[in-house]
Amino acid sequence: MPERVRVVAAVQRPYDGARSRHFLGVPPMEPGEPDTRSRMAIPRVLVIEVRPDGVFLDRYEESGGEVGDTWHESIDDAKAQASAEYGENLGSWIDVPSSEEDAVSFALRLAQASS
């Protein structure tokens, strides 16, 4: 079985970047229609994982709840997206050891240790 490719990074606290670009809900479909979406929280950690259907950049809040995801063609593309969104608030990317089953828990432990 091929080894899983997963990398994680923390989003620094206190966070002083732009508001989240991710929303929960459907955008207005017609001009003048109200926007009923709610803005998702700024993540605490990011996880990039290579899956059979592409590379995913997943975002998680402090409690481990998901706050958005995006599909990418490559790990470099996902990292570039993360850098564009979080800028100087983005920590270093760290490979998740194959012995770690849960990349999110691993990332949250690293983020907490660096706080």
Image (cartoon, helix red, strand yellow):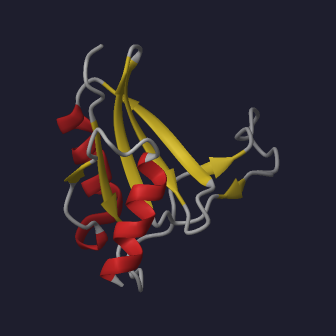
Q: Residue at x 41, y 86 (%)?
A: 14
Q: Residue at x 23, y 27 (%)?
A: 74
Query: Is 56 on the left or on the right of 31, as rendered?
Result: left
Front residue of 48/104: it is 104
Q: Residue at x 26, y 66 (%)?
A: 87
Query: Percent position (x, y) of residue 79?
Result: 24, 46
Query: Percent position (x, y) of residue 10?
Result: 34, 65
Q: Is residue 31 above or below residue 87?
A: above
Front residue of 70/55: it is 55
Q: Is residue 47 above or below residue 53?
A: below
Query: Is 7 on the left or on the right of 76, as rendered?
Result: right
Query: Percent position (x, y) of residue 25?
Result: 74, 43
**Residue 53, picture quadrant:** top left
Q: Is residue 35 above or below residue 61?
A: above
Q: The N terminus appears in which quarter of the rendering?
A: top left
**Residue 84, picture quadrant:** bottom left
Q: How many marks?
A: 0
Query: Is 41 on the left or on the right of 111, as rendered?
Result: right
Query: Percent position (x, y) of residue 76?
Result: 17, 37
Q: Residue at x 56, y 51 (%)?
A: 22
